[in-house]
Image (cartoon, grey):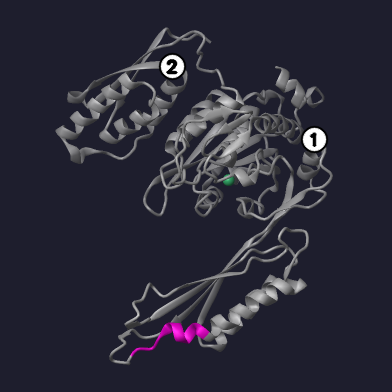
Amino acid sequence: MTFPESISVQLNCTPSHAEYLIKIFPRKPELRRTIWGYKESLFQANPAEASPWCGSVYSGVSAVRKFMTPSIVFDPAQRTCYFETKLKRSEQLDKIPNTLELAKELIRIDSTSRRSNLAIIDYIQTILEKSGFVLERLLYADENGTSKANLVAKKGKGRGGFGIFCHSDTVPPGEEEWKPFDPKVEDGRLIGRGSCDMKGALAAAIVAGANIDPAELSKPYYIVITADEETGMWGAMHVIAESGILKQSWPENGVVAEPTSLIPIRAHKGAVRIFVTAQGKAAHTSTDKGISANFLIAPFLAEMAELADLFRSDKRFMNDKFHPPTNGFNMVIDDGGCNPNVTPAKTVCTMSLRTMPDDSRDMAIDLILKAAEKYGLEGRHLAVEPFSVSAESEILQAALDITGCNAGATAHYGTEALFYQDYVNLIIFGPGDINQAHTVGEWIDIEQIRAAESYYTQLIKRCCRFQRYADCKSHKDIEQD
Ligand SMILES: [Zn+2]
């Protein structure tokens, strides 16, 4: 393949695009100034004309940003922005960054759940396209109307095979002083928001797949990357409902790449929410004509306090394979922030249980709903089954084999496996310690990211029946490359 000496990219650009450009070129002050000037002049020309994000701007910019050193010219009259770039021969477009470099790039793109994740998805898409994946981009708007995308990538032909399930979003950076989007390497650690949960794992999954020759795969390799995992796992539900690639064929085996310190996790807790509502009648307390929903619900709440004790002491509601072995019964109460001089008209008590296999949860739900009924309150519930995979499953056995662990462990947190487990045999298996996830100063051991790349490569080769599996590199071999 030959590469041109130079390339120019022309983009129709709005003020909001310009703002995005400023963000992604933070260390090029002259570029920032130019773009800023461009943005201001657009605003002055017609501030109402800021159009929604357009995918082509992101795609163009992603390519420019990664592989070239751009200079930029703008033409407000034409509402057009030009990138002029000189391509260096050494910066060929098909060069895939190594796992650590890629993890750093992913951290640089702020993908906090409340923002659109289109920028990070665009960047990943560029790399996966160059690496021979077939891609499916699934767009949706979240509950605030913000554009989000999930990405389903497949390499190799046929059915079954192996998939790695990742999310692109992170929790917010937190209040304290640190540089969450300016990745830093220190004492063998990569520091930055998402380094542990889960941009390190995402980079390992991408690079492991990018380096595999599809002609050697007897079964396909998939990477599924969602939005909104941290805020309710809406992306995973959207993928299940919308992905044409997965409707055709799900992988047979897979890994959810949440941080487990690379210990294979074979089960985690599920979730139940129970909503109990008391309906009263609002009135100013001076009239004494109201009916307080809080007084109506009070005896029910007292019973819930007794149930909380029961759940913590009765073995029927526990499972000793989990730490802690209890169902985490919790209750919050909402009367709409009623003033003390008004009788509250409606009070909702929301309870949650973290369910485990064999924890008598049906009995627990029944006890709660029967108590609600006894006091004339409305009750309803939603349940998501706990996640578990059979001890004999191919994926668990393969992971135990390559890591040298004796048995799969259990986790106290939930993952997207709750939704995917109906379609694919899964384990939770990713680099980094869960205790580092979501913290201010979040970090991951770089050795863990490298080991993840090696383990993921071995799982792809094994589960996708790589034709030269015997040649499979060990972790140490990859390190020496
Ligand atoms: Zn996560």
Mark 2 vs mark 1, CA separation in Å: 39 Å
Residue located beneath label 1 in the image: 402
Name the one closer to the observer, 209 or 319: 319
**Which of the numbered marks, if any, corresponds to residue 56?**
none
Q: Ligand 1 quadrant?
A: top right
The answer to whether 121 is drawn above or below residue 268 in the figure is: above
Relative to residue 463, is residue 184 drawn left or right? left
**Residue farthest to the left, as pictured:** 45
For badge 1, the amino acid type reads Ile
Residue at which label 2 appears: 68
Bounds of the magenta segment? 290-298
Task: Give the image quarter of residue 260.
Answer: top right
Q: Determine the image quadrant of residue 439.
A: top right
| Mark 2 Cα-neighbour bin, 10 Å: few <14, some 14–19, many ≥20 | some
- Which residue type carries mark 2? Met
Image point (74%, 74%), residue name: 314
User: As drawn, which residue projects farthest toward the bottom?
Assistant: 288
Q: In the picture provided, is 44 more to the left or to the right than 196? A: left
Q: Of callouts 2 and 1, which one flags the residue occurring earlier in the amino acid sequence?
A: 2
Q: Residue furthest right?
A: 406
Mark 2, secondary structure of its residue:
loop
107 to 359, vertically: above or below: above
Q: Magenta segment: does it hold 113?
A: no
Q: Which percent across, then down, holds residue 6? A: 39, 10
Check the image and report above or below for 82 versus 49. above
* Residue drawn at (27%, 22%) of the image: 34
The reply, left or right, for residue 118 in relation to residue 372 is left
Q: What secondary structure is found at the residue carrying circle 1?
A: helix
- Whole-percent x and y of residue 223? 60, 37
The answer to whether one can see residue 473 in this image is: no
